[in-house]
Image (cartoon, helix red, strand yellow):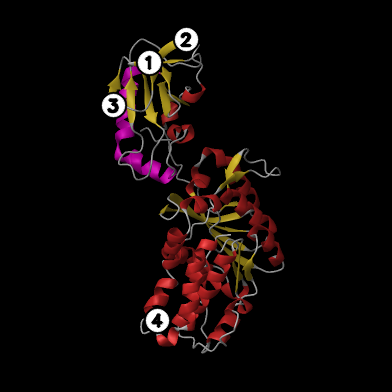
Amino acid sequence: MLKSYSPFLKHLQNLLASQTELPDFSKQVESAVNGLASSQLENLVSRAQLKKSGAFFSSPELSRRVACELKSNNRKTALVVDPACGAGNLLLAAASDLAVAPTLSATLKSWGTKLAGFDIHDEFVKATHLRLALYACHRGAKFDLPLDSAISDYFPNIKKADGTVAIASLQSKRCHILLNPPYAVVKTPQNYNWISGNVNQAAVFLVQCIEKLKPQSRITAILPDVLRSGTRYAKWRNQLEEIVSIKKIESVGNFITADVDVFVIDLEIDNTKPGLAPGVTWWEDNISQKISDNFHVSVGAVVKHRINKNDKIVPYIHAKGLPQWGEITNPTESVAFSGRIESPPFVVIRRTSSPSDKKRAIATIVTGKRKVAIDNHLLICTPKAGGYAQCKKLIGILKDDTTNLHLNNRIRCRHLTVGVVKDIPAP
């Protein structure tokens, strides 16, 4: 329970009850139904709690972007549902196209038949009810509710529940799901074989929704970019292509409140024509020549906290202090290590890499005659032929702005992978 969010609920309740007495009511409502819910979440709830629960609200701009997909679906016959509604940002964006009746009670009664949402936090559900009511007033509905009226009565389908379970109650309805699921790290359920160990909860949440929805239902979701581009989620992507029709995939940049890059996916529950729609790809892949044509790419083998001090001492390279775009011949550091060591010449690339970096694939050439142990925070590109000259050519490719553009399209996580580096265009 996020009890610390309660002061914001009190503010919303007072705002709704005192609207006729507030000269700046319109301005305050504008704030309440836009960014205030997110800023209050950050102010009132600790970062640790937010990270644990994965509770980060969609921005008004991103919410509107997602809600735009409703217009391509037959809105009049679809119930709009947010299975992880938070404080209701996506439902508010959906409500922007709903008709407003002369009175608040008539408006909410109508909206309550068209909107559904679930969240495990009662405070968020109450905030959703209140913000929808305020939004209706903001759009011109006249307040006519008794003082003791329960706003929740007008929204029987927006309630406290686990969305992945409660969504099964809507199986008889044709739905359009608007979804920004939790991004917390959880253990993979035993019945899923597309990944093992820990997994981003968003991947599990989406699949669980798909499994419980009626055919022809639609889902438009905001998901962390690692699901689109990460090597670990390749089987997850393959499974989606087998069970749904994917209409759109669009990278949308940084989700500021969660501090992670995201993408929007639009899909339809249609196992008769599953897969990627014409023209839709997870990333651009029309590359004729790639780095993997001329280089073996691998991850450095040294995991520093696992070394055995009794092993043989060998030269050692890690990311700190390496000359960017330069060369290193005689490493000054060493490590006790009996695993795989590398024979120069080769190129090392820093794995840590963000879309905000000026250059995504910062590299260094390693030369000399001694074999070297490489830290696992570095990627190794060993030429199949051509030796040092091929390494110099690779530095030029990695330094070029076209490589930056390619990588920012291909992966917007804060690290590079072997698969991503292999696929870098190498003209």
Q: Which of label 3 and label 4 is nearer to you?
A: 4
Which quarter of the picture shows residue 149? bottom right
Q: Residue 344 — which label?
A: 1
Q: Which residue is drawn at 52% across and 75% down?
A: 130
Which kind of residue does numbered mark 2 sit on? Answer: Lys
Where does label 3 land, which residue? 323
Where does label 4 land, which residue? 25
Look at the image and say whether residue 245 sits in the magenta stretch.
Answer: no
Local secondary structure at mark 4? helix
Which kind of residue does numbered mark 1 sit on? Answer: Pro
Q: Distance between the residues labelled 4 and 1?
A: 70 Å
Tags 3 and 2 in contact by the CB under 8 Å rule? no
Look at the image and say whether residue 385 sits in the magenta stretch.
Answer: yes
Q: In this view, does 357 lie above or below 131?
A: above
Q: Which of label 4 and label 1 is nearer to you?
A: 4
Which quarter of the picture shows residue 199? top right
Which kind of residue does numbered mark 3 sit on? Answer: Pro
Q: How crowded is mark 4: few (under 14 residues within 10 Å), some or many (20 or more)?
A: some
